[in-house]
Image (spheres, rainbow, N blue to C red):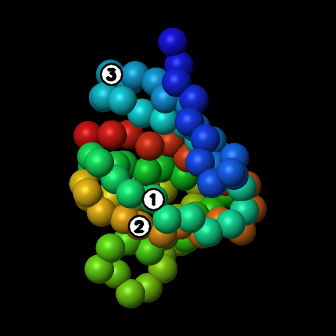
Amino acid sequence: MFKTNEYFDGKVKSIAFETKEGPATIGVMAAGEYEFGTATIEYMTVTSGEMAVLLPEETEWKTYAAFETFIVEKDVKFKVKVARDTSYRCLYK
């Protein structure tokens, strides 16, 4: 069955599932700023809206639009800003 996750007082929610490529989540973020930590390499794809991302060791935010993907390394923290409700898919490797 699916596992649901809720973070930041319900402002970020996701549903975990298995794909042929490995475990993944589909989620939604309400407008706001968030900091996440990783336990695996994560391939994050914005599926609607836009997501500004500050990856570790970067000094400038980069904005990703719908259907753009960024990769976050294992065991790091990264920051995300969304101006409006934004959905994403995260594939864990």
x and y percentages locating residue 55 in the rendered image: 37, 71
Check whether the beta carbons of the residues at disc 3 and disc 1 lie within 8 A of each other.
no
Provide the residue designation for mark 3.
20
| Of the pair 37 and 46, the residue shown nearer to us | 37
Check whether the beta carbons of the residues at disc 2 and disc 3 lie within 8 A of each other.
no
Say whether residue 73 is left or right of residue 16. left
Residue that appears at 40% across and 22% down = 18
Mark 3 residue type: Lys
Say whether residue 28 is left or right of residue 91. right
- Please state, as top left, top right, bottom left or bottom right, where the C terminus lies in the image: top left
Mark 2 or 3, closer to the camera = 2
| Of the pair 90 and 4, the residue shown nearer to us | 4
> Looking at the image, which residue sits at the far top?
1
CA gap, disc 3 to disc 1?
Answer: 25 Å
Which of the marked residues, 2 or 3, is nearer the chain's N terminus?
3
Identify the secondary structure beneath mark 3.
loop
Q: Residues within 10 Å of mark 1 (few under 14, many from 20)?
A: few
Q: Residues within 10 Å of mark 3 (few under 14, many from 20)?
A: few
Identify the secondary structure beneath mark 2.
strand
Provide the residue designation for mark 1.
36
x and y percentages locating residue 39 in the rendered image: 29, 48
